[in-house]
């Protein structure tokens, strides 16, 4: 696949890539390659499904015409399996969330929204732009894939996805006839819903990119006509985002207020009923995906999402928020929350603090602040150096431009994964022995680019792999 993408890139641009690397796998079978060249970088996309590619290309062109922030479609190859799009970098909404830490308050001391909450509000406003794109005439759905509308048949398809790929693969017992009755009842609540709005389908924090202070949107190739509430439910009940109840309630009210101003026919009470049904349907559909990708395809990232989804389902039952009487679904939720599937698999410690930092070898390794001293020191000086490029000299490893530069080189990601592999046994032993701190320092020549980037990346990896406190400090560039 890489050679095919490389060949089409060279035909398009008339030059060989300066760097080319496969981006981490996601929930789809599409392959994304970041390609660096004389003008910057682009993403090369390889996807065997020509119908899905046609849907993406059609929606991209329409959204760009509407002024929506989606990546520019740079080039479509004669081979309908390959196309090139604008590179938006690596910063997603998900990456900005306080993983393993408490969310900030909705309001700051001066009464204004906290920056992260305001970002979510910005995203909801943009969602309304997508939902109403095309005006009264609507969008052109002639290339939609795999179905044009989220109708009763499509809803039952999603619910059966949960049955076959989660319930059956996990070995959970259930009544086939009772579950089917619940599925029919749930789909019946939404089937009459107006479906002339665009439904993004997978509107969640990993598909929202941050660039130049604005939210940009990707992975909308599964879009179709559908109810307004579905995408709101997808965002607010995004499993691993783990939004607090207070945030969900406030954001829901914010969306209702905005939609009431922008859609003449919007009915707030009807929307609330639809939202409740969509929340349940979306979580069940997502659990089917976690089963397919995790239990069947053995991708651990998806297995880690299962406990979050079960916790969201439990909240619906505990707070009486199921949209109607669904006895078999409710019984399964109660069984799930007492099962091993509800257990978070990240090692936990309330005492251990992992202290991650960057430093300059020119200025020397900072003195240990802990009584016992020690820890890990990793030398980043062998990695590609952005500081040698005039454009990056005054930037740091936190700058989007430097991040984009370093992410082009596979050896950077490989280095970080090897560091994590080396550190993991120590962290596990420290948790077991109830130790209080462990330091991990990254050094480069000036303590400005590579070491800062690696320390930031390692802090994220540690939060993803361990339920412990992570403290990040840059000794040379603290700002």
Image (cartoon, rainbow, N blue to C red):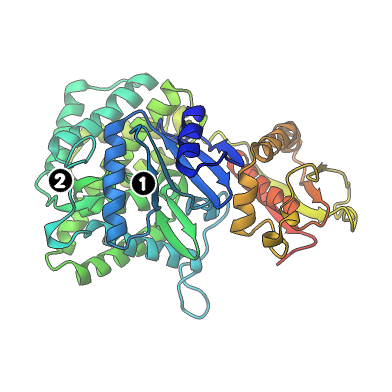
Counting from the top left corner in percent of width and height, residue 449 is at 73, 55
Residues under labels 1 and 2: Cα distance?
A: 21 Å
Residue plotted at (88% across, 47% down): 373
Viewer-nearest residue: 456 or 229: 456
Please state the total of marks drawn on the protein image: 2
Q: Is residue 39 left or right of residue 273?
A: right
Q: Which residue is mark 2?
A: 190
Under circle 2, the secondary element is helix
Q: Which residue is mark 1?
A: 315
**In the image as oriented, which residue stretches furthest toward the bottom?**
110
User: Does residue 249 appear anywhere in the picture?
Assistant: no
Indicate which disc residue 122 carries.
none
Q: Which quarter of the image is occupied by the C terminus?
A: bottom right
Q: Quadrant of residue 260?
A: bottom left
Viewer-nearest residue: 11 or 451: 11
Above or below for 457 versus 122: above
Residue plotted at (27% across, 61% down): 66
Viewer-nearest residue: 131 or 445: 445
Counting from the top left corner in percent of width and height, residue 64 is at 32, 57
Label 1 crowd bin: few (<14), some (14–19), many (20+), radius 10 Å: some
Counting from the top left corner in percent of width and height, residue 446 is at 82, 57
**In the image as oriented, which residue stretches furthest toward the front?**
14
Above or below for 287 versus 277: above
Counting from the top left corner in percent of width and height, residue 40 is at 56, 52
Viewer-side label of 1, 2: 2
């Amino acid at each position: 696949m890489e050679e095919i993408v490389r060949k089409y890139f060279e035909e398009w641009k008339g030059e060989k890539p300066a760097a080319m690397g496969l981006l981490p796998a996601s929930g789809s079978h599409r392959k994304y390659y970041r390609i660096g060249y004389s003008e910057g970088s682009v993403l090369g996309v390889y996807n065997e499904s020509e119908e899905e590619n046609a849907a993406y290309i059609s929606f991209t062109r329409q959204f760009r015409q509407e002024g929506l922030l989606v990546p520019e479609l740079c080039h479509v190859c004669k081979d309908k399996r390959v196309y090139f799009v604008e590179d938006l970098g690596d910063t997603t909404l998900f990456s900005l969330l306080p993983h393993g830490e408490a969310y900030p308050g909705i309001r700051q001391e001066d009464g204004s929204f906290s920056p992260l909450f305001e970002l979510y509000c910005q995203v909801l406003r943009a969602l309304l732009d997508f939902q109403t794109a095309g005006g009264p005439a609507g969008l052109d759905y002639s290339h939609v894939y795999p179905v044009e509308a989220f109708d009763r048949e499509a809803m039952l398809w999603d619910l059966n996805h949960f049955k076959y790929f989660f319930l059956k693969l996990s070995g959970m017992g259930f009544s086939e006839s009772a579950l089917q009755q619940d599925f029919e009842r749930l789909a019946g609540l939404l089937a009459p819903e107006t479906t002339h709005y665009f439904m993004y389908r997978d509107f969640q924090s990993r598909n929202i990119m941050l660039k130049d202070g604005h939210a940009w949107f990707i992975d909308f190739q599964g879009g179709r006509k559908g109810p307004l509430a579905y995408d709101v439910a997808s965002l607010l009940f995004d499993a691993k985002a783990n939004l607090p109840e207070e945030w969900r309630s406030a954001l829901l009210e914010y969306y209702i207020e905005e939609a009431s101003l922008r859609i003449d026919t919007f009915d707030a009470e009807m929307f609330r009923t639809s939202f409740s049904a969509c929340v349940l349907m979306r979580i069940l559909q997502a659990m089917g995906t976690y089963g397919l990708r995790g239990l069947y395809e053995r991708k651990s990232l998806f297995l880690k999402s299962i406990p979050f989804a079960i916790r969201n389902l439990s909240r619906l039952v505990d707070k009486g928020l199921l949209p109607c009487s669904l006895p078999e679904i409710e019984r399964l939720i109660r069984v799930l929350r007492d099962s091993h599937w509800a257990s978070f698999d990240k090692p936990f410690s309330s005492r251990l603090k992992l202290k991650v930092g960057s430093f300059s070898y020119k200025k020397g390794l900072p003195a240990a602040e802990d009584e016992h001293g020690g820890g890990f020191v990793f030398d980043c000086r062998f990695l590609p150096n952005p500081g040698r490029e005039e454009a990056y000299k005054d930037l740091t490893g936190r700058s989007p431009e430097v991040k984009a530069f370093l992410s082009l080189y596979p050896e950077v990601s490989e280095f970080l994964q090897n560091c994590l592999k080396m550190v993991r046994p120590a962290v596990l032993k420290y948790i077991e022995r109830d130790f209080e701190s462990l330091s991990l320092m990254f050094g480069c020549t000036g303590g400005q680019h590579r070491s800062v980037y690696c320390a930031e990346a390692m802090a994220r990896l540690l939060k993803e792999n361990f339920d412990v406190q992570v403290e990040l400090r840059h000794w040379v560039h603290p700002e």
